[in-house]
Image (spheres, rainbow, N blue to C red):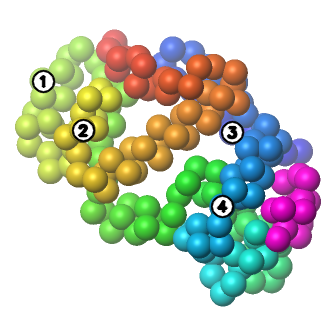
Amino acid sequence: MPQTISTEFASGSIKPVHPSSIETLALYALRKMSLEQLQALPDVREGFENVLQYNARYSNSIEGLLAALKSKRYTLARCKRIVMCALLGITKTHLTYATQAKSLYLRVLGFRRSARPLISAISRNCSLPLIIRKADIAKCAPDTSNLLELDIRAHDIYALLEGQSSIPRDFSQPPVIV
């Protein structure tokens, strides 16, 4: 049975997204990428961008694409990661920034009223950017802004798959205060 991706927000349950729902979007993302863009994807090495580009053009389903890509060197899990990185626009550079802790940030999605002084103290004393509203992104370093844009893009794709407007939920609603 295929896995589903599910998330819950404080406002209630969100419908799970079946992997087949992203099939067309993922294939399109791969097909529109140049060889250089494919080579910039995480886990793509040793000419695999050529194999990826060829098979993306001639596959009509994600299952068919993954079956064509899978090999001893490129496991199914690795191929799935590459496809998702292509869809979200995640590059080796993004991963380098994130893993070297050069551009991490803290996102506040909700808190208790009694914790308001704590949020203020964190904001004053923390070395990492504290993101509460979309306006806070402008205060971030470029590397951090790039990672936040990836976060926004992921929400946008989810909203599209769910039939919602393209405005990411977590920036169109204030943090949940209980």
Which label is found at residue 117?
1
- Please name which of the two marks, 4 or 3, marks the residue nearer to the observer: 4
Crowd class of label 1 (few under 14; some 14 to 19; many from 20; radius 10 Å): few
Would you name the residue on which mark 2 appears? Answer: 138
Residue 68 drawn at (x, y percent): 88, 70
Question: Depth-wise, is mark 3 or mark 1 nearer the camera?
Answer: 3
Q: Nearer the viewer, mark 4 or mark 2?
A: 4
Q: Mark 4 sits on what residue?
A: 33
What's the residue type where badge 1 is placed? Pro
**Badge 3 local density, few (<14 within 10 Å), some, or many (20+)?**
few
Give the quadrant of residue 36.
bottom right
Residue beneath the point at 73% across and 44% down? 25
Mark sitting earlier along the chain (3/1): 3
User: Position of 121 compared to 159: left or right?
Assistant: left
Q: In the image, is 35 to the left or to the right of 151?
A: right
| Residue 61 falls inside the magenta stretch | yes
Residue 123, quarter of picture: top left
Mark 2 → mark 1, Cα distance in angstroms: 24 Å
The part of the chain drawn in magenta is 54-68
Residue at figure coordinates x 53%, y 58% from the top left = 90
Q: Are marks 2 and 3 in contact (CB under 8 Å)?
A: no
Q: Which mark is residue 5?
A: 3
Mark earlier in primary sequence (4, 3): 3
